[in-house]
Image (cartoon, rainbow, N blue to C red):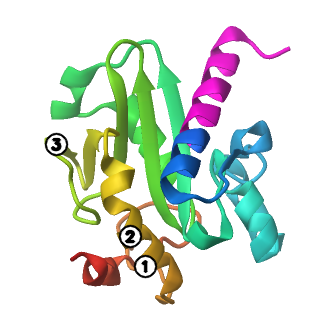
Amino acid sequence: MPSAAKAKGNSFERELADHLTKIFGYNFQRTPNSGAYSSFANAHRRNYLTPAQNLLASGDLIVPEQLSKFTFECKFYADFSWPKVFSTNKQLDKWIEQARNCDKVWFLVIKINRQGAFVCYEHNMFKVPGNYFKYQDCTIVSINDFFEINKEIMLSYNNSSPKIEDTHANISCTSPLPDVSGLADFLP
């Protein structure tokens, strides 16, 4: 029996998977054990998995093959210190590091009790629906309409074959980050 906090996180992962399934028309599912097998501290395990196995073992959601170049890390918390984003927010830094720890384009989706849900991603990669703010080299926006507005960009990007290489030498990461420089080509 999971703890109340774990059950709360699991329910948000299922909620996000259902939301993305409705938007994209492809099946998203919660990853068993929330990606614990190959995420963050266990990232080295991905080196031994096939591409199909990596779809199942990356992030908190199993993504459909049509969006296999993306990964989703989910966080659901009762409280969050928004004022700390104007200096250094160690909690957010840890979450971003965890989301970045892959060779895919990542999304950190954060839900805070009575405050809403937000999407954090590499700055200047996607269309921004409304207000946003920049935290370090990331953009944080409300989840409202974000994936709907960026649906075609994401599907187009996934169908391209950009070379994956480590172009972010200044970022501490155990595996190479995706080269997202060509992603702007998919913006209308």
Few, some or many C-alpha atoms within 10 Å of disc 1 (few <14, some 14-19, many ≥20)? some
Magenta stretch in the rendered image: 1-16
Q: Is residue 121 visible?
A: no
What crowding class fits label 2: few (fewer than 14 Cα within 10 Å), some (14-19), or many (20 or more)?
some
Residue 179 location in percent, x, y? 41, 79
The residue type indicated by label 2 comes to Glu
Q: Which residue is nearer to you in this view: 129 or 74?
A: 129
Q: Is residue 15 visible?
A: yes
Q: Quadrant of the N terminus?
A: top right
Judge whether residue 134 is colored magenta.
no
- Residue at image point 16% right, 42% down: 133
- The residue indicated by pointer 2 is 152
Question: Which SS class for mark 2?
Answer: helix
Asked if the residue under mark 1 is in contact with the one under mark 2, i.e. CB atoms within 8 Å, the reply is yes
What's under tag 1, amino acid-wise?
Answer: Ser
The total of numbered circles placed on residues is 3
Element assignment for label 3: strand
Rendered location of residue 147, percent (x, y): 38, 52
Instruction: Determine which of the numbered discs, if any, sits on residue 90 in the image.
Output: none
Is 131 drawn above or below residue 163 in the view shown?
A: above
